[in-house]
Amino acid sequence: MRTLTSNTEYVAGRCNIGSAEITQRKRIGFVGLAIIGIGFLIYISSVFFLNLTPLLGFLFIFPGTMAAIGFIQARQKFCAAYGFSSVANVSVHLGTTIKIEDEIERNKDRNKAIIISLQSIFIGVVVAIVITILGLIIQQ
């Protein structure tokens, strides 16, 4: 375990970001939610009034995944991109990373990053399917 002037410690495969990075991930999650909300209103209006194809609802996979990855990373105190890049930032400053040298730790981080990425994509797909189904219902 390693720390960089924070009360958060790096733990391979479990925690690779500190409070500043966690806050940043929450922001990403909320931006994704805002895009979903605004986009949903535009989408439903377009499907209902302009007869736009409801299949465009599948585009919500992107903001759905964005929101999910932001919130999952914040909740789990783990950045997938850092995990893939073999770095960590448990300091109180954004972007101040340390290189993870140990191969076992890097593998644990990479595995965790893969899991977070797959979870986020799955949630994005579910969001897109639900919105598309709602679009199909509205169109009828």
Image (tube, helix red, strand yellow):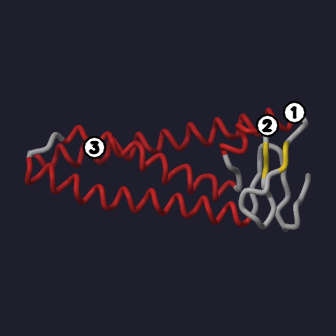
Q: Are marks 1 and 2 in contact (CB under 8 Å)?
A: yes
Q: Horizontal placement of 63 versus 25: left or right?
A: left
**What residue did someone put label 1 on?**
104
Q: Position of residue 23 (x, y in %)?
A: 64, 66
In the image, residue 10 sits, relative to residue 123, either above or below, namely below
Measured in 3D between alpha carbons, the distance from the residue under mark 1 to the one under mark 2, in whole angstroms, is 6 Å
The residue under label 3 is which amino acid type?
Answer: Gly
Quadrant of image for the C terminus: top left
Snapshot quadrant of residue 32: bottom left
2 or 3: tag closer to the N-terminus: 3
Which numbered circle lies on residue 91?
Answer: none
In percent of the image, x 11 and y 46: which residue is there?
A: 139
Residue positioned 25% across, 40% down in the render: 56
Residue 54 rendering spot, x and y as whole percentages: 19, 42
Q: Earlier in the sequence, mark 1 or mark 3?
A: 3
* Residue position for label 3: 57
Q: Secondary structure at mark 3?
A: helix
Kind of residue indicated by mark 1: Ile
- Give the percent coordinates (x, y) of residue 119: 55, 41
Q: Where residue 137 appears, x then y in whole percent?
A: 16, 47
- Total labels: the figure holds 3
Left or right: 123, with 38 as reference point: right
Describe the element under mark 2 as helix, strand or loop: helix
Residue at the location (77% across, 51% down)? 16
Residue drawn at (70%, 51%) of the image: 78
Q: Residues within 10 Å of mark 1 (few under 14, many from 20)?
A: few
Give the Cα distance between marks 2 and 3. Answer: 35 Å
Q: Amino acid at mark 2?
A: Lys
The residue pinned by badge 2 equals 108
Work out how far the residue at label 1 is from the one at label 3, CA to CA, in angstroms. Answer: 41 Å
